[in-house]
Amino acid sequence: MHLASVAALGRALASREISAVELARLHLSRIQSHPDLNAFLDLRPEVTLAQARAADARIARGEAGPLTGVPIAHKDIFVTRDFCSTAGSRMLRGYMSPFDATVVERLGHAGMVTLGKLNCDEFAMGSSNENSYYGNVLNPWDKAAVPGGSSGGSAAAVAARLTPAATATDTGGSIREPAAFSGITGIKPTYGRASRWGMIAFASSLDQAGVLTRSAEDAALIFNAMLGFDPKDSTSLERPPEDFARELDGGVKGLRVGVPREFFGPGLHADVERAIRAALAELEQLGAQLVEVGLPNAGLGIAVYYVLAPAECSSNLSRFDGVRYGYRAEQYQDLIDMMSRTRAEGFGSETKRRILVGTYVLSHGYYDAYYIKAQQVRRLIARDFEQAFQTCDVIVGPVAPSVAFDLGEKTADPVAMYLSDLYTVPGSLAGLPGMSVPCGFSPSGRPVGLQLMANHFQEAALLRVAHRYQQATDWHQRVPPGFE
Amino acid sequence: MALTLDDVKRIALLSRLSVTDEEAGQVLEQLGGLFTLIEQMRSVDTAGIEPMSHPLGGVQRLREDVVTERDDRAANMRNAPAQQDGLFLVPKVLE
């Protein structure tokens, strides 16, 4: 049962083949037998089982939906009333939120059962999950490798079949990169589709919630319950409800697949390029037409991102002052000293680095040269995509320049770490929906992810292309050895 | 532009992050690498380009100025590091 898809689990629950309580116990026991992955930060079996009993009662009453009783786990960036919410930070150790994030609430209303909270980089800042105060997460495919980040716990848990699905968030690639490194499916929607209410904020003009699953079909089912307008999020978009699974069986005949030449430059590792080229050939075989497109400013994405994201982070994280909630330093002399020591001790080094950069680029005399300049170049990057989508329906390329790197390989060099997000950041800056689907392995056995991007609001089209590809290939069904 | 140790200390103060001289030195070195990367962006011609603050050009939605949250002092204060009589405690600010 732990290998079954979300869709299949929904059917098994509806036909009473299995109960939500049995399913919850099965997954909790799998989680407990793989503690070395360090994917979970908080488990409360009594909460999980109470939710499962409620789901079973709902099924018995004939009021179940397609997700009722199906387990899920949440990235520890989403606040939850019944589990701790730490954002991977010492600052929020033991924090209990007075409310649930809208995403958590909506999935709860659909009857999904929460298994627990998942490890991540501190405040979602990182590409390897090595910035969590609560320790590294291991990649189930190779325990010497990182699972990707920042949603590393979410990716490892789905890849290891500890949960059929997990929520995640993407600011510059934090869903797509860990999905690629861990050999699973990940999707971030158009900016404004998922509510940011109760998502601990990092960079508010970029942060978007999405999901990690084993297939595009499962992601579509979860999106149906998870996305939608929320008056509590000021950047939430008011759009009519949509069935994200409606196009799944539409195929790719005649689809124009844009291949951005800038994504196949010298930085791309040969083993990744080989798998991506094979996937492009597969799409062509299935009836799609490949067209070369240009994204001339995409290469500036990392530079722009590392001005804008730190600027927004320095502002968002000013709320952590040791007064109202969270960590407070033990020793201090006065109020300012209390705040400065609390923040120095409560935040990890990457978070502090970004706060400093952000404060600098927003400070008097530098604001126009850095912050405004970055916002202008952001528009140039977004325009490149607008142009490209005149001649293609989706853009396809690599998610990351390499497969998962070794634990510790990039921790001493922040800039090398930032470059892991070279191909994911441009789409984030433009607010586009993006996906990663498994498309092969390196000779060392580490997974490769294929990135799919579409124009704003074209999630259903992305999911259709991914679904067609997954019907023709079995990369997404591969299970890491030892987790079958 | 070259960042100096004094710049790092000044922004640390503005950020309310206490740093030792040694930490400030390390940060200076790491930020040097990052700013080399960021400089790439500064050579781009952006004359006449409108800065982009929202990826879909959205306008902040306004709502009626009415109370929408219920008052739940106990739940909201549950995580306070120091409190007394329903108030947050901080070091004395005025003598």
Image (cartoon, coloured by chain):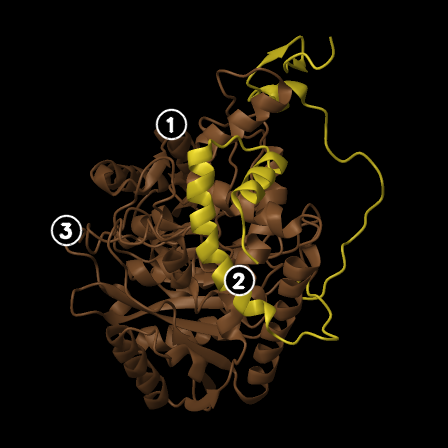
- Between residues B16 and A43, which one lies in front from this camera angle? B16
Residues flagged by tags 1 and 3 on a common chain: yes
Looking at the image, residue B68 lies above or below residue A173: above
Quarter assignment of residue B60: bottom right
The numbered dot on residue A148 is none
Give the residue number, with chain letter if any, for mark 1: A46
Dot in front, 1 or 3: 3
Residue A188: percent from the left, percent from the top? 49, 61
Dot in front, 1 or 2: 2
Residues flagged by tags 1 and 2 on a common chain: no
Mark 2: give few (<14), some (14-19) or many (20+) Cα within 10 Å. Answer: many
Seen in the image, is A221 located left or right of residue A363? left
Q: Amino acid at mark 1?
A: Glu
Residue B10: percent from the left, percent from the top? 60, 39
> Which quadrant, please, contains the C terminus of chain B?
top right
Seen in the image, is B18 located left or right of residue A17? right
Visible residue check, residue A122: no
Give the residue number, with chain letter if any, for mark 2: B38
Give the number of callouts.
3
**Rendered residue at 29%/68% (across/down):** A448
Q: Amino acid at mark 2?
A: Ile
- Tell me which numbered mark, 1 or 3, is placed earlier along the sequence: 1
**Rendered residue at 44%/31% (across/down):** A90
Residues flagged by tags 3 and 2 on a common chain: no
Give the residue number, with chain letter if any, for mark 3: A482
Chain painted in yellow in the figure = B
For label 2, the SS is helix
Residue B74: percent from the left, percent from the top? 63, 18
For label 3, the SS is loop
Chain painted in brown in the figure = A
